[in-house]
Image (cartoon, helix red, strand yellow):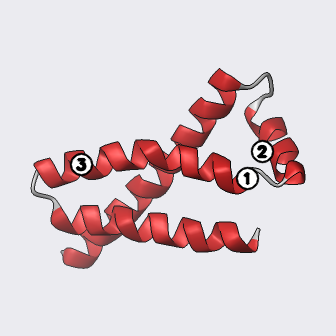
């Protein structure tokens, strides 16, 4: 059951980062999501967008800790670490 909770937390963390990035691009830029990703990648700002998207993940992490879902919270942290490493190579 612990591995299942860890995987669910990982998926929640990755999804929250994507949703946070989508909200930032759609609310604060004039681009659509996919065009915004391509333009910001060409400008070298993709890491900044993923960092801003991670703010929503921080909120999800706090909620999971409040609900005593520690393994899911670990999955969220794992997704943030993996996204940070992935951002270095993109």
Residue behind mark 2: 37
* Mark 3, residue position: 62
Percent position of residue 77, x then y: 37, 66
Few, some or many C-alpha atoms within 10 Å of disc 1 (few <14, some 14-19, many ≥20)? many
| 84 lies above or below 33 | below
| Residue 22 locus on image (x, y percent) | 62, 36
First-in-chain label (3 vs 1): 1
Q: Quadrant of residue 84?
A: bottom right
CA gap between label 3 and label 1 equals 25 Å
Dot 3 falls on a residue whose secondary structure is helix
The relative height of residue 15 versus residue 33 in the rendered view (above or below) is: below
Q: In which quarter of the image is the C terminus?
A: bottom right
Mark 1 — residue?
46
| Residue lying at 49% horizontally and 50% vertically, measured from the top left | 54
Q: Is mark 1 on a helix, strand or loop?
A: helix
Q: Which of 60 and 29 is in front in this view?
A: 29
Residue drawn at x 17%, y 54% as measured from the top left: 65
Labels 3 and 2: the sequence-earlier one: 2
Picture layout, residue 25 above or below residue 90: above
Residues packed near mark 3 inside 10 Å, few (<14), some (14 to 19) or many (20 plus): few
The earlier-in-sequence mark between 1 and 2 is 2
* Residue in the image at 65% along x and 46% along y: 49
- Residue 50 location in percent, x, y? 61, 51
Q: Are marks 1 and 2 in contact (CB under 8 Å)?
A: yes
Comparing marks 1 and 2, which lies closer to the viewer? 1
Distance (Cα) linking label 3 and label 2? 28 Å
Q: Is residue 15 left or right of residue 71?
A: right
């Amino acid at each position: 059951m612990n591995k299942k909770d860890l995987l669910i937390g990982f998926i929640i963390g990755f999804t929250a980062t994507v949703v946070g990035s989508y909200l930032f691009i759609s609310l604060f830029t004039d681009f659509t999501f996919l065009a915004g990703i391509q333009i910001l990648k060409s400008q070298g700002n993709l890491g900044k967008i993923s960092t801003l998207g991670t703010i929503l993940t921080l909120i999800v992490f706090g909620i999971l800790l409040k609900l005593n879902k520690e393994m899911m919270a670990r999955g969220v942290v794992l997704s943030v670490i993996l996204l940070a490493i992935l951002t270095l190579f993109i």
